[in-house]
């Protein structure tokens, strides 16, 4: 049973399409006279994963969809459908699968070395960040990206929200994305989430020296009835990891990041101090 996590599944046309994917998988599996466990063994996932794919609880990665086509002899059907669903996602191709898992996670732990994690972003901050990375984009494109970013954050307001832990490098506080007003609002928003215990936020200060990882973001996700995953992201690329050995290494790295960070109380004070600095700067311009 999925329990509370199941109630966070997204609805709408894309979810219906994933449900069709799952129904077709079940039909083709049964036609091949394979149990979920037998099919899982052949595509190198557990039988429980196959069951979650069939129920549209969890979405397969591309290589799994390709192996399903090979084993079930479906002439690329599952790969084509996977690519169509991911392409239609409002998220970058490399992040779409990780975004789908957010709604199922019981705990999410983010590390951000340079920009505010998506689940904490305000609309002005997200808009400034989108324009900075797409300077020639049309307004419609920008607003679509901003809406998708803000919509993702709604899971933190849900009654069944995941436990959310964010470790920010001090760079995140000091890089004025969108200017002083947008940054003041953004950091104030983070402080509100921390004070309401919606998010646990820690900051790694400059004085701590080089952190255990600095070249990209790191995310850990835990689930009620599925193995944990790790997601790493660099420039125009991302990797969703579910290999137990790699996930364990990512978890160990996150533990080192926690050890390097200020306490939640000291971190909140630093965030609020930086927010006040930006507000003063905005008021004088």
Image (cartoon, rainbow, N blue to C red):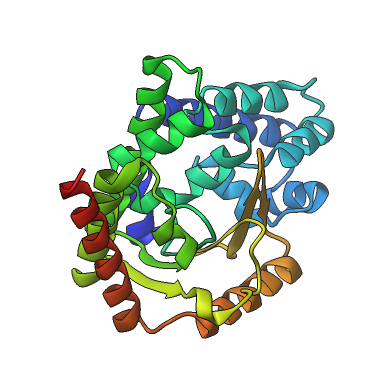
Residue 133 or residue 193, whichever sits in front: 133
| x, y percent for residue 178 | 35, 40
Residue 28 or residue 130, whichever sits in front: 130
| Residue at left offset 42%, top offset 48% | 118
Identify whether 251 is placed above or below 2: below
| x, y percent for residue 194 | 26, 69
Identify whether 58 is placed above or below 111: above
| Residue 125 in view here | yes
| x, y percent for residue 15 | 43, 32
| x, y percent for residue 278 | 26, 55
Residue extending farthest to the left is: 283
| Residue at left offset 26%, top offset 69% | 273
Identify whether 230 is placed above or below 273: above
Quarter of the image with the N terminus in it: bottom left
Residue 4 or residue 155, whichever sits in front: 155
Q: Is residue 278 left or right of residue 111?
A: left
| Residue at left offset 33%, top offset 31% | 147
Quarter of the image with the C terminus in it: top left
């Amino acid at each position: 049973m999925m329990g509370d996590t199941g109630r966070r599944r997204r609805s709408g046309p894309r979810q219906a399409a994933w449900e069709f994917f799952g129904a077709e998988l079940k039909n083709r599996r049964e036609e091949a006279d394979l149990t979920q466990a037998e099919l899982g063994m052949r595509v190198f996932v557990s039988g429980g994963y196959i069951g979650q794919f069939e129920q549209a609880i969890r979405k397969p990665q591309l290589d799994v969809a390709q192996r399903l086509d090979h084993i079930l002899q479906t002439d690329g059907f599952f790969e084509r459908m996977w690519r169509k669903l991911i392409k239609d996602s409002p998220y970058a191709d490399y992040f779409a699968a990780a975004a789908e898992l957010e709604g199922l996670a019981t705990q999410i732990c983010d590390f951000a070395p340079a920009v505010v994690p998506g689940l904490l972003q305000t609309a002005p901050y997200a808009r400034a960040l989108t324009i900075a990375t797409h300077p020639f984009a049309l307004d419609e494109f920008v607003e679509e990206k901003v809406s998708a970013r803000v919509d993702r954050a709604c899971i933190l307001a849900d009654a069944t929200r995941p436990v959310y832990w964010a470790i920010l490098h001090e760079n995140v506080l000091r890089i004025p994305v969108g200017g002083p007003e947008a940054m003041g609002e953004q950091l104030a928003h983070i402080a509100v989430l921390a004070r309401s215990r919606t998010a646990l936020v820690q900051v790694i200060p400059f004085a701590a020296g080089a952190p255990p990882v600095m070249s990209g973001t790191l995310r850990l996700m835990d689930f009620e009835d599925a193995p944990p995953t790790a997601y790493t992201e660099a420039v125009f690329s991302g990797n969703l990891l579910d290999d137990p050995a790699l996930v364990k290494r990512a978890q160990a790295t996150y533990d080192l990041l926690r050890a390097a960070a200020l306490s939640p109380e000291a971190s909140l004070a630093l965030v609020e101090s930086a927010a006040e600095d930006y507000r003063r700067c905005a008021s004088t311009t």
